[in-house]
Amino acid sequence: MTMSSLVRPALRAQALSPNVFAAFSALALKHGSVNLGQGFPTFPAPDFLKDAVCEAIHANNNQYGRPGGHPELVGVIGTQYSEQLARKIDGMTNVCTYSGAQEGIAAAAMAFVNPGDEVVVIEPYFDAYVNAVKLAGGKVIGVPLRTPEGATVTNSSDYTLDPAELDRAITPNTKMLILNTPHNPTGKVFSKSELVEVSDVVARHPDLIVLSDEVYEHSVYDDTEHIAFATINDMWKRTISLYSVGKTFSVTGFRLGYSIAPEELSRELLKIRAALSFSSVTPIEIGTAKAIAACRSNNYYQDFRTMMQAKRDVLVAAMTQAGIPPVVPQGGYFTVGDTSGPLVGAVPRLSEDDTAEQALLERRDFRVARWLTTEANITGIPMSCFYEPHNRYLANDVIRFCHAKDDDTMLAARSNFQKFAKQLS
Ligand SMILES: Cc1ncc(COP(=O)(O)O)c(C=O)c1O
């Protein structure tokens, strides 16, 4: 008997999708490639946050916390979002903190999705949605963002959601819709009129709950405005809005996120949260409370937005020069690019009808991403893995690059893109 035959993982563990980021990070490391793969910042977090966390540790705030979040933290979140969501947010009953927004996604699925329930997700998607739904025993139904037929996609606003297609995807078995704005990976920021269209669809399905993932709310560029879905019509009563301290303050390793929802939804989230990791890290919650309070007067959010926009601009210019036309993102951490042009036309194409799960690693975007890592020393993530298998053909040529990187990394990426363009011209 081999060792492996003794191990019988639960079906839910077997159902989870492999993590593509680990594979590309390992390849990037091996080839000394500039890693624009995974969405985490490599620049330092603001001092006012780091100092506040250190102070909280030294003041001996180092024990278990309140599962819904430290009272000081949920208090300042309540104050900030009472303004942002234009309604009274009570920290103790409407807010719940998590070990990262990702745990919030899992908590939402665990709290509201029964085995066999369907969850509609917009493709391409943040891959953790799929695993969270599978863990809860639910079924993912993907509805892809569409781009204008035959036209070149130049801006993330060119990706649109067809409300009729969304409506058709929702059945009596649908329990939850997961929205994401600003969107990972395309950078799309849903406009008010688009959110109203979505809310009209949602309103036709009285039992539907919406998880609105808004973790990139402070990374919006140019004159784009982030609008919370919970502020649209009467969507508040069925919406769980989700945010990430990691993304907002460039501290993804703090693993701190939070949801804001009506009390009857929040109560259920809190039960699951307490049953998972019980509470977040107490000194981090206290330090974050001080930092969020400081943001009322220190202009951090505006400065962060300006900094992120400058990084986006460096990447957009470098990709353009290198012959990988970028889809200029309105928000978020990522810029996606079309690699079907002459520059990377050298990468062999695969047969287009090959959509089997096993063939995922051989899709063209995967080959291009590997090839860019080994030949150009720039690592991005192939976008087809953010779709359900039957829709992966929609991203055959698209690679996602993260622009939330320190200046040296961004300049190294630009230089590698330039070298590569010269080499092939
Ligand atoms: C859209 C989206 N939601 C949620 C998360 C998870 O955030 P956190 O690091 O707070 O768990 C990510 C991380 O990449 C993301 O891209």
Image (spheres, helix red, strand yellow):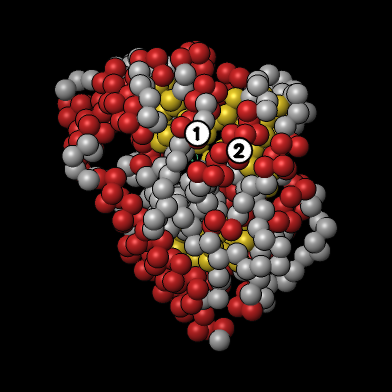
Disc assigned to residue 198: 2
Residue at 44 percent across and 27 percent down: it is 259
> Quadrant of the image for the C terminus?
bottom right
Q: Amino acid at mark 1?
A: Ile
Q: Secondary structure at mark 2?
A: helix
Residue 340: x and y in percent read 66, 70
Give the quadrant of residue 317: bottom left
Q: How many marks?
A: 2
Residue at 19 percent across and 43 percent down: it is 298
> Is 149 drawn above or below residue 82 in the view shown?
below
Residue 324: x and y in percent read 56, 71
> Is 202 drawn above or below residue 124 in the view shown?
above
Residue 77: x and y in percent read 32, 27
User: In the displayed structure, does residue 403 sit left or right of residue 184?
Assistant: left
Residue 82: x and y in percent read 34, 27
> Quadrant of the image for the N terminus?
top right
Q: Is residue 293 visible?
A: yes
Local packing at callout 2 (Cα closer than 10 Å; few below 14, some 14-19, many 20+) is many
Query: In the rendered structure, are the residues bearing label 1 and label 2 in contact, judged by CB atoms less than 8 Å apart?
Result: yes
Disc assigned to residue 232: 1
The reply to whether the residue tagged 1 has its Cβ within 8 angstroms of ligand 1 is no
Local packing at callout 1 (Cα closer than 10 Å; few below 14, some 14-19, many 20+) is some
Q: Could you tell which of marks 1 and 2 lies nearer the N-terminus?
A: 2
Pick the front one: 71 or 299 = 299
User: In the displayed structure, does residue 347 sit left or right of residue 259?
Assistant: right
Whole-Å distance between the Cαs marked 1 and 2? Answer: 10 Å
Q: Amino acid at mark 2?
A: Val
